Amino acid sequence: MKLFPRLPSRFAEGVFVEQSELPFGEVVSATSHRFMIWPATGADRVTKAELERLSSSLREVAVAHGYPGTLAHGDQTAVDLALARALWQTAEPLHVRGRVR
């Protein structure tokens, strides 16, 4: 298992507000933040490259489902499932040690 960084909600909310006001082409994903914290356990930390790969995978799914356009109510389940699948497929190898894929 690898540890994922966390951003306290008071800082995450500010990032969300800043990013939500930008045009889609200017929205950026970040793999670090000056107030980012790590869980205090002994597992390895996820790397910057792994976070970038995860971000890219999730962004591809969102775009494939019409983002940044408005999502029809009936399409929400499909997008949720596709994002969950991409999250699992990209992050799952980070959670299982010694397993060959």
Image: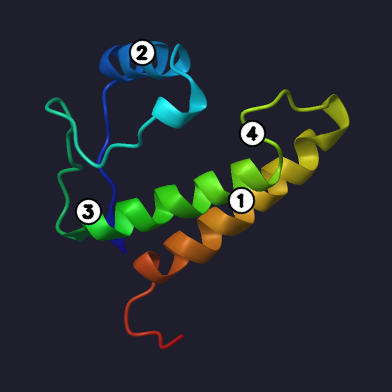
> Which residue bears the numbered disc 4?
67
Residue 70 appears left or right of 98: right
Using the image, determine if residue 1 lies above or below residue 55.
below
Residue type marked 3: Lys
Q: Which residue is under mark 3?
A: 48
Q: How far is mark 2 from mark 4, CA to CA?
A: 18 Å
Amino acid type shown at disc 1? Ala
Residue at mark 2: 18
Q: Quadrant location of residue 97?
A: bottom left
Residue at point 38%, 58% (across, down): 53
Please, what secondary structure does the residue beneath circle 1 have? helix
Q: Nearer the viewer, mark 1 or mark 2?
A: 2
| Mark 3 residue element | helix
Residue 46: in sight, yes or no? no
Give neighbour class at mark 4: few <14, some 14-19, many 20+ (Cα, 10 Å). Answer: few
**42 displayed left or right of 16:** left
The residue under label 2 is which amino acid type?
Glu
Contact flag, marks 1 and 2 (Cβ < 8 Å)? no
Calculate the distance from the C-alpha at mark 1 to the C-alpha at mark 4: 16 Å
Q: Nearer the viewer, mark 1 or mark 4?
A: 4
Residue 48 image position (x, y, % from top left)? 22, 53
Q: Earlier in the sequence, mark 2 or mark 4?
A: 2
Residue at 61% in and 50% down: 84
- Mark 3 or mark 1: name the one nearer the start of the chain: 3
Q: Tell me which numbered mark, 1 or 2, is placed earlier along the sequence.
A: 2
Position of 42 with respect to 13 (left or right) is left
Name which of mark 1 and mark 4 comes first in the sequence.
4
The residue that mark 1 highlights is 84
